[in-house]
Image (cartoon, rainbow, N blue to C red):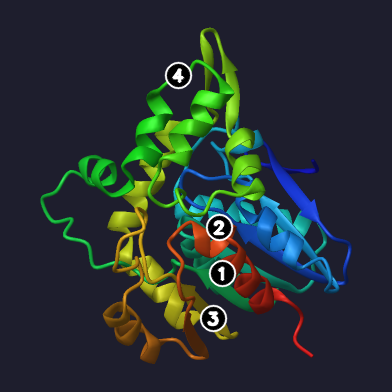
Amino acid sequence: MPSSPCPGGELAVARWGKGRASVLAAHGITASSLSWRAVARHLEATSTTLWATDLRGRGASASVGGPFGLARHAHDLLAVADHLALDRVVLAGHSLGAFVAVLAAAARPGVVDRVVLVDGGLPLPLPVEGVDPDALLDVTLGPAIERLGRTFPSVAAYEAFWRQHPAFTQNWNDDVEAYVRYDLAEAPDGVRSRVVADAVRADGRDLLLGHEPIGRALKAIGCPVRLLRAPRGLFDQPPGLQPDELVARWAPHIADFTDDVVDDTNHYSILMGGRGAATVADALAPTP
């Protein structure tokens, strides 16, 4: 896996394809570059190269420390583009990565052709006044964040943990399995996630409390922005994380904005399931 220098170390960067068009993708808050594997397979027939970074504190970039936060990840993403000499790029982001893509696109308009946001990117009107952000993260992310403090006796036990997650019980496939296995590191008494909990909490607090800079960035983006959103959330329950009322609130403030609901998907399967990955790939493929 290639790497890209950054303050504090080197970020791992996955690459799929060898096409002339470049897509640079950012993953979710407890995820990794492997969350884009299914999308990459659907892009194989197009003239596209998909680059997906392991954000600091995740995957093969787990050893890269802070500071964390959305602005730091956006800077890192643009540094990857510079290192890879990507003169023009489509920026893509899922979940937390969508917010990172928004900030990066606003910061470097001359580099970004289009932005594709996958179930994220529009600031959520969460009731954070007087609420402990860490407690809110525990409630919102549930098993995804709870696993970070656990050691599992085997790879099979870790897979079983994910297989029973409501978002995956009907959506398990080879891409999800590869994503789950990539997340693992050996521990003295078993295996555990490579994701650094402090990174997740720092990024989560920044996301919950950073509505204003995200909003300013959305309004500043001049290139086309396309949002693909799932009708169901983290636990396969309605509504999704980017509901109709949120889209209606922000759509008038984004210069060139389109919005599509990807039917029969949840927050995870919109990226790693068959229907979702194919739709995201179509949105990323070069325009005729």
Mark 1 and 2 residues: CB-CB less than 8 Å, in contact? yes
Per the image, label 1 sits on a secondary structure element best described as helix
User: Where residue 125 sits in the image (x, y, percent)?
Assistant: 24, 68
Query: Closer to the N terminus: mark 3 or mark 1?
Result: 1
Query: Closer to the N terminus: mark 2 or mark 3?
Result: 2
* Quadrant location of the N terminus in the rendered image: top right
* Of labels 1 and 2, the one closer to you: 2
Query: Closer to the N terminus: mark 1 or mark 2?
Result: 2
Mark-to-mark CA distance, 3 and 1: 18 Å
Graded by Cα atoms within 10 Å as few (under 14), some (14 to 19) or many (20 or more), the crowding at tag 2 reads: many
Per the image, label 3 sits on a secondary structure element best described as strand
Give the residue type at disc 1. Answer: Ala
Quadrant housing residue 146: top left
Quadrant housing residue 121: bottom left
Which mark is on residue 107? 1
The residue at which mark 3 appears reads as 226
Q: Residue at x 51, y 54 (%)?
A: 171
Which mark is on residue 151? 4
Mark-to-mark CA distance, 3 and 4: 39 Å
* Of labels 2 and 4, the one closer to you: 4
Which mark is on residue 74? 2
Mark-to-mark CA distance, 1 and 2: 9 Å
Mark 3 and 1 residues: CB-CB less than 8 Å, in contact? no
User: Where residue 58 sits in the image (x, y, percent)?
Assistant: 56, 38
Give the residue type at disc 2. Answer: Ala
Q: Residue at x 65, y 49 (%)?
A: 175
Give the residue type at disc 3. Answer: Arg
Q: Is residue 140 visible?
A: yes
In the picture, measured across the screen, residue 222 lies left or right of residue 150, that is right
